[in-house]
Amino acid sequence: MARDRASRPEARPLRLFVAVEVPEEARELVAAAVAPWRESFPRGKWVPTQNQHVTLKFLGSTWPRLVRWVIETVGAVAAGAEPFESRVAGLGAFPSARRARVLWAGLEDPGGRMGALSAALEDALSAELEPEKRAFTAHLTVARFEPPVELGEELGRSELRSKPFTVERLVLFRSHLQRPAPRYEPLGTFPLGG
């Protein structure tokens, strides 16, 4: 009897995203800055520091037949960009601090370089994958809240600023959904500038 195609691991879609990694030192600085909110909102879904990154393109469910093409496409986009500096700077919330569903730490994007990388990925991958409808904002997701919470006006006055770091590569991750937090498996690393 033939096995059902959908039951084979190689036939199931993979949950993928392209990201920029942020140094551990910067992520630890973020953890210290958000500690008061973590105490106030312990029921929030707090992202483990090792899982914090800047998502440039969320691909979502991607068929295995497309993975090689995705790897080649992300590599080509990375090769066409040059390394640049950024830093973690400030805290914010989506959609607002008064009705926060997401608490995030922002990243400086001098010259719009991260935004340009995100747009280049969107364009290059649009032949096979759904484009993102929301505007790109360079950020690390720190926590999610359901229902939304009020984080207060002091959120926007945060003095959070990490040391500058160089963005030198893109990483294609596969997300394995599990509890208490997803596990991210790197499928490819792509240096900027080739």
Image: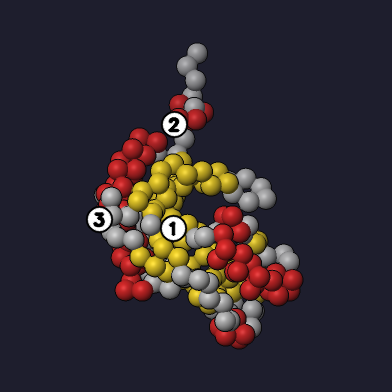
- Measured as percent of width and height from the top left, residue 84 is found at 35, 65
* Residue at disc 2, secondary structure: helix
Circle 2 residue: 11
Please rate how many residues cluster around mark 2, counting C-alpha atoms within 10 Å: few if below 14, some from 14 to 19, many from 20. few
**Which sits in the foreground, 133 or 160?**
160
Residue type at the position of mark 2: Ala
**Which sits in the foreground, 187 or 10?**
187
**Which circle's residue, 1 or 3, is located before the other in the chain?**
1
**Would you say 167 lies left or right of 181 here?**
left
| Rendered image coloring scheme | secondary structure
**Which circle's residue, 1 or 2, is located before the other in the chain?**
2
**Would you say 95 lies left or right of 68 here?**
right
Per the model, the C-alpha gap separating discs 3 and 2 is 32 Å
Residue type at the position of mark 3: Gly
Please rate how many residues cluster around mark 3, counting C-alpha atoms within 10 Å: few if below 14, some from 14 to 19, many from 20. few
Circle 1 residue: 20
**Which circle's residue, 3 or 2, is located before the other in the chain?**
2
The answer to whether residue 95 of the structure is visible from this angle is no
